[in-house]
Amino acid sequence: MNVLECRDLTKIYGKVVAVKNVSLGIGKGQTKVIFGPSGSGKSTLLRCLGLLEKPTSGTIYFNGIDVYTTKQDLNKLRAKIGFVFQEPSLFRHLTALGNVVLGLKHVLGYSEDEARRKAMEALKLVKMEDWANYYPAQLSGGQQQRVGIARAIAMDPEIILFDEPTAALDVELKWEVISVMKDLADRGTTMLVATHELRFAKEVADEMIFMDQGEIIEIGTPEQFFRSPMTERARKFMAKLLG
Amino acid sequence: MLFLLNYSDFLINGFITTVQVTLIGVGLGMILGILAALGDIYGGKIIKIIVNIYVEFFRGSPLIAQLFLIYFTLPALTGIRLDVITAGYLTLALNSGAYQKGYLKGAMEAVFKDQFLAALSLGLPLRKILMYVVVPQALRIVIPAWSNELASMAKSTTALIVIGVREFLNTGVSIVAQTFKPLETYLFITIVYFIWIYSMLKILDIVYDRVKIPGLEPVI
């Protein structure tokens, strides 16, 4: 059974069809990578899967349960689906530690001490324990993203969605974030990652999903995509990414 | 100015009343302002319309007219009679709330949407998102604007003289009526107002410095 799955998911904003009839599922322990040109609907799809936006039509299943028609408590499910955003979106009035503690305390009900201990563990995993008491504005973009990842993993989610977490970072900072994500994938974390970092995809992805104009164009293993994509559009886009 | 010592109890009571109405007016106004700002940002259409009618009305009419309205007209319409001081609190709170709504709304909108989404993704319910993410940031951002409001409200309390509240300026008027010494009396009253308001602003400056967080500077 897939941890998270969508069937015929469509999201329309006004007259713009951002995502069109997308079906995909992520099984436990899998890492899947979504890629495609900007505006191809990756972010919208992820936000729908993260239950941050309601799809216009289609079904989302969490552990096999239809989320919307069975009227699940969305906040409870959101706590089980980690989300890392493209722009580092740390709470600006809280330290790195405070950012990780917030959800542990006020969503999962940990005591202050337990929450702090658990938050420090998460910060260690992303190698940010020495920066625990710094505020977001005092950290680099890459460090902020790592704290964002710690904030997500501390909640022990069943899956983590990454929305182009390195797209807003300088080249030097990208790798510190990617290496953290690779660690997570190696430890068997279930992940769906929108990214253009092909090296990451090649090393850890079980499956790559190519999207364009709101639709899934091609699904395949990294080997397939690197050797010879089946569709013309995927081939062109791969060529562009590989320079 | 020594003759004023004879009226010290009288003056002190007047001053305490002024401080009270200022703090209660601004305090209640802040609660009203937060609620109105939240209503305007997150509320439905009807709530938005009510909030905007309230804000425009109290910002767009004179404070003294509002005082008369609440002290004289409200009882005539509803039968509820307020004593002068309650009418004073209520009017100042409604007036201040209308202004504070504007500052607070700006500050809350400055707490960008990404913060809201991030909190949502952790599974926090709306009430907790507002309590732990939006409001703490908004309050820090709003402090400088809020200092202006406090100073302006402290000065506005003198309007309460028109419905007969024994506030600080009013005690001065009574003393002048008895002593015929307007020069010294009003000079003294004005200086006390100045020292009081000036120190409140200084204290808020210090508070602002204390709670200031890098990256959370005011944007309004």
Image (tube, helix red, strand yellow):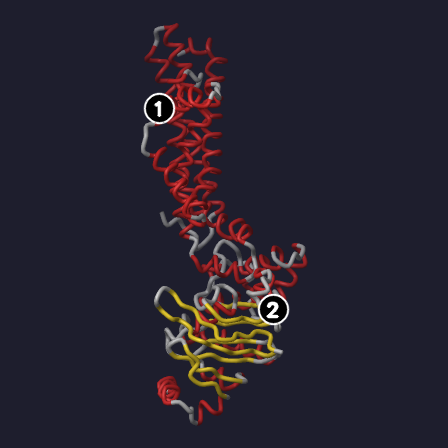
Whole-angstrom CA distance, mark 1 to mark 2, is 58 Å
Q: Mark 2 lies on which chain?
A: A
Name the disc covering residue B205, or none. none
Residue A15, placed above or below residue B73:
below
Which quadrant: the N terminus of chain B?
top left
Total number of numbered labels?
2
Q: What element carries label 2?
A: loop
Name the disc covering residue A157, or none. 2
Marks 1 and 2: CB-CB under 8 Å? no
What residue sits right under mark 1 in the picture? B64
Which percent across, then down, holds residue A55?
47, 67
Return the residue nearer the eye: A150 or B205: A150
Residue positioned 41% across, 47% down in the render: B45
Residue B2, placed above or below residue A124:
above
Q: Mark 1 lies on which chain?
A: B
Which percent across, then down, holds residue A145?
49, 68
Q: Which amino acid does label 2 sit on?
A: Pro
Q: Is residue A180 visible from the viewing direction of this image?
A: no
Return the residue nearer the eye: B218 or B138: B138
Return the residue nearer the eye: A157 or B60: B60
Q: Which amino acid does label 1 sit on?
A: Ile
Specify the farthest residue to the bottom. A227
- Badge 1 crowding class, 10 Å Cα cut-off, few under 14, some 14 to 19, many 20 or more, is some
Which percent across, then down, holds residue B168?
42, 19
